[in-house]
Amino acid sequence: NEKFPCNIFSTIEECYNNCNEEIMSSQTATFPCNTSPSLALIAKEAKTNGRYVGFRSTLSYMELRNMQEDTGFIQRMDNVTTRQRSYLCIRSSRIYDSIVCPEGYIKQNELSVVNGCKNKGLECGKGFQCVCKPCMRAFDVDVFPKILEDRTDGNSSDSGGEKRAFFYEACKKNDICATMEQLRPTTFTFLDNRKRNNVNFQVRFFQGNDEKFKLLTLIQSSKDPFEYEFNVNSSELGISIFEVLADFEQISQSPFRIAIIERDCVRDFGDALLVADDQGGCICKDSSVKLVGGNCVQLSVLFPSIIVPLLILAVVGGFMYIEFKRKKHDSIWRVKRNELEFDTPAVVIGRGTFGLVLLAVYRGTTVAVKRV
């Protein structure tokens, strides 16, 4: 009993040695007057083994039955023929199926519940099933961003690094519901907690400061008729807004905001010199230019790679031009032997110390040629 706990003794043996009629009847005793030592010992052992905080009087049959029916532990079975009513005990093989959330709260999806403790860094002992915060406050409609993450570890035999969907707390009114990159779609899921039929749901998306909205396509879940999905894709940097409407009336926690951040062009194209522009396109940085092949090159690398070869070509070309001009200039004074015409025999018109002077014709002109 919470009012009279059997916790004044450190061990059961001490309780046994001290639980006698004299202590039970004393004013300092913490036991109810009708508790015997043997009953106190049994209660203490049950409390310890069951890890109970304390004991209280049992509920009436009706109260207990209604509570078990509300929490899904029993199910009422009505026999129309015999007009008899019976109750079937429900035993769930999975801990997720046995979770019942109080009024005003809803149960999170199974994947989030199963991984709830692990996501919070809490380890579950071997052979146990643990849950951490399986229920969350329910609104008219709950909106969640679906985040793909790799939650497998090296010892897991799961999908080998395959990304799986995880859901976090529902988005709140005017809060940043998700952060996404330009032109990188993000999937959102929303649940109709009121489970309404024949309701026309709409999602209006306002990109940046644009006053015009775009209606997003809703896809109804095949597993839950009150669960829907829609994709948001935006190219404009900054804060965008989407509204959720039911029968053309905005729900109570709408609108929601989305932060659009710069696209990761390096990841998409593998070029470290690419950056995203205001509309999500990938362009070269200011200090680089795009080549014909599509890759960006820094100007500090491009200029030397162009100027140095051009300088070399200019030097080589200048040298060849000078050589050509020199040869052309020399050709005026250099006489080729085959251009000289001598008589047969050659006419000697003079003699010197080192040779003869002969008469010849060079390009139609009579000249004197000294032969050494």
Image (cartoon, grey):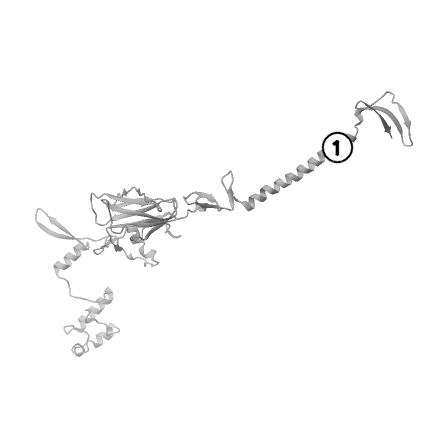
Q: Say which residue label 1 marks.
A: 329
Residue type at mark 1: give it: His
Q: Position of residue 18 (x, y in %)?
A: 21, 77
Outermost left residue: 82
43 left or right of 288?
left
Q: Is residue 165 visible?
A: no
- Residue drawn at x 55%, y 46% is 300
86 left or right of 308?
left
**Image position of 119 with respect to 290: above or below:** below
Of residue 361 and residue 47, the one placed in the foreground of this image is 361
Q: Position of residue 193 (x, y in %)?
A: 23, 50
Q: Tell me the quadrant of the picture where the N terminus can be found.
A: bottom left
- Residue drawn at x 15%, y 59% is 64
Q: Position of residue 124 (x, y in %)?
A: 32, 58
Q: Is residue 136 visible?
A: yes
152 left or right of 9?
right
Q: Secondary structure at mark 1?
A: helix
